[in-house]
Amino acid sequence: MTTAFSPSCVAHWDSLDQGKFADETATVRGLLANMPLDGTERAAVLAAAVGLVEHARASVKKQGVVESFLQEFSLGTREGLALMCLAEALLRTPDEETRDRLIAEKIGSADWSSHLGQSDSLFVNASTWGLMLTGKLVDVDEEARTDLPGFLKRIVGRLGEPVIREAVAAAVRIMGEQFVVGRTIEAALKRSNREGWLCSFDMLGEGARTAHDAERYETIYADAITAVGKTAKGQGPEAGHGVSVKLSALSPRYEATHEARVWDELYPRILRLARIAAEYDINFTMDAEEADRLALSLKLLDRLAREPELGGWTGLGLAVQAYQKRCPEVIRRVAELAKTSGRRLMVRLVKGAYWDTEIKRAQVFGRTDYPVFTTKAATDLNYLVCARAMIEAAPHIYSQFATHNAHSLAAVYRMASERSVKIEFQRLHGMGEALYDAARDAFGPVTVRAYAPVGGHEDLLPYLVRRLLENGANSSFVHALLDERVPASAVAADPISAVEAHPDRHAKIPTPKDMYMDRQNSQGRQNSLGRDYSQAADRERHAVALQKVD
């Protein structure tokens, strides 16, 4: 028997949408007025962050395989872009002929030979050979080995052959598999325990499309939680492995416009999974997704937190995205929920992995503004403001900080240490090892949990594309950390100073309504505004309008 969920709770979370499209400049100025660090602290944090970068560069013997891959094939190279486009092509092409043409275009247009032997990772070099399709599926003479670009041109015409097509698809899958801990939860547990990693396992799957998909994903999650729980040995949610769950994988209609169906179908599934996690006393985190689903996910969290049958379990958690303007208010309300429900919550603060999607969706649907910040510095500042709020909410919140950024790491560590609050950091599997090794040398014992994807090749490519987009750009911290050409002071720059100097939105990203305007010449037209049915207010206005028509 589940608890009742009152209309007042629904309205409480729906009111979050009032800040969804808040003016960015005004929001940033509000963050600056709520400065998370004073002048002395900022100077100390900056020095510590630069020290972390320098120490990581001086001590690292070998990059993680994912970092090596992103360094060699960044989105600043033609080859990196070709790989991302190719991975997407293999996901989306409707027929073999189209797939052949895309593969021929992306593989044939790039200079793979320039990357051969340039990385210290055997995986990256092997992937390069595989992408050049040399030495395995075709006979390669000495002339071809000395003229690899010419050789590629000669075989591009043969890429339409089934065996070549499958070889390229296999090469991309092999690359994707380096981004995961194991194909099964059993393999992932074995590897993580062998390596001594503390993990939050993410069972790959980008969302249910049918009721059958939702049932299948529930079974996958239940099996994973059970497998992790059986190895927990009473460690508890903080010291043992956990599992991250995507709510969109548990319902084909995880949308605000289908809220009744969410309560009828999705909530029972998430409750069944939470029961298993509570039984084994492990961490169970609801992953963050698109901004349109934020209020709905928090309603689900609210009801779960108040479930008597979950007892005194303290492993229930959620991920919150700092690139959303509403993040500080979300933290405040989640801390309030933890107090009123009596259930300690685990909160993972991330910067966010769907930025490009949020920007494009807001433009396509004619929103008044964006739900996310348009500059990286504003997101980094918001992260620090939210981090302080989470730390100050202890013990009602157990804070988990996911970051590969040296400045964010140093700032969060200082804020937590000054308040004697226990926290943990999180990193993506295959990334951040050098940075957190440097942190342990500089600060002493630091708890670090790896966000560890688990899955087969059919679920790998979407994850690969997202990681390429998120971390493959030259401006990303992951790409710049171990690049000696980038000064350590630039890699560890203080985002507060950057925002103070430029508090406005990104100059090249106007609001969606002005995206067709030429602001210099006052020409063009305004974009048409659409209704946002993820917001209760817009749904209610639409319902009133329909009643008038009737």
Image: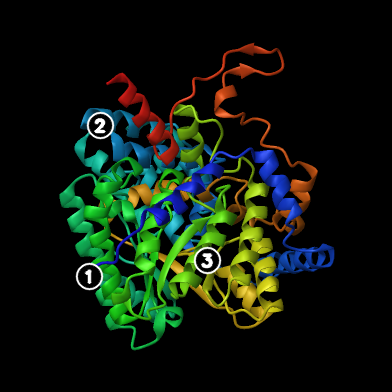
Secondary structure at numbered mark 1: helix
> In the displayed image of the protein, which residue is found farthest to the bottom?
233
Lateral position of residue 501 relative to residue 472, left or right: right
> Residue 337, labelled with which disc?
none
Residue type at tag 2:
Gly
**Quadrant position of residue 394:** bottom right
Q: What residue would you read off at disc 2? A: 160
Q: Nearer the viewer, residue 274 or 224?
A: 274
Choose the circle earlier in sequence order: 1 or 3: 1
* In this picture, residue 216 sits left or right of residue 366: left
Q: Residue furthest left?
A: 212
Q: Amino acid at mark 1?
A: Asp
Q: Position of residue 286 (x, y in %)?
A: 39, 61
Q: Secondary structure at mark 3?
A: helix
Residue visible at 29% across and 60% down in the picture? 455
Please name the residue shown 39% across and 62% down the image.
301
Mark 2: few/some/many CA within 10 Å (<14, 14-19, 20+): many
Work out whether 399 lies above or below 8. below
Residue picked out by circle 1: 223
Give the label, 1 or 3, closer to the camera. Answer: 3
Q: Amino acid at mark 3?
A: Glu
- Residue 480 percent across, percent down from the top left: 63, 54
Q: Which residue occupies the foreground of this view, 143 or 207? A: 207
Q: Inspect this view and state whether residue 61 appears.
A: no
Report how far apart the C-alphas of labels 2 and 1 lie in the structure.
Answer: 40 Å
Q: Dot 3, how many residues are within 10 Å of its Cα: few (below 14), some (14-19), or many (20+)? A: some
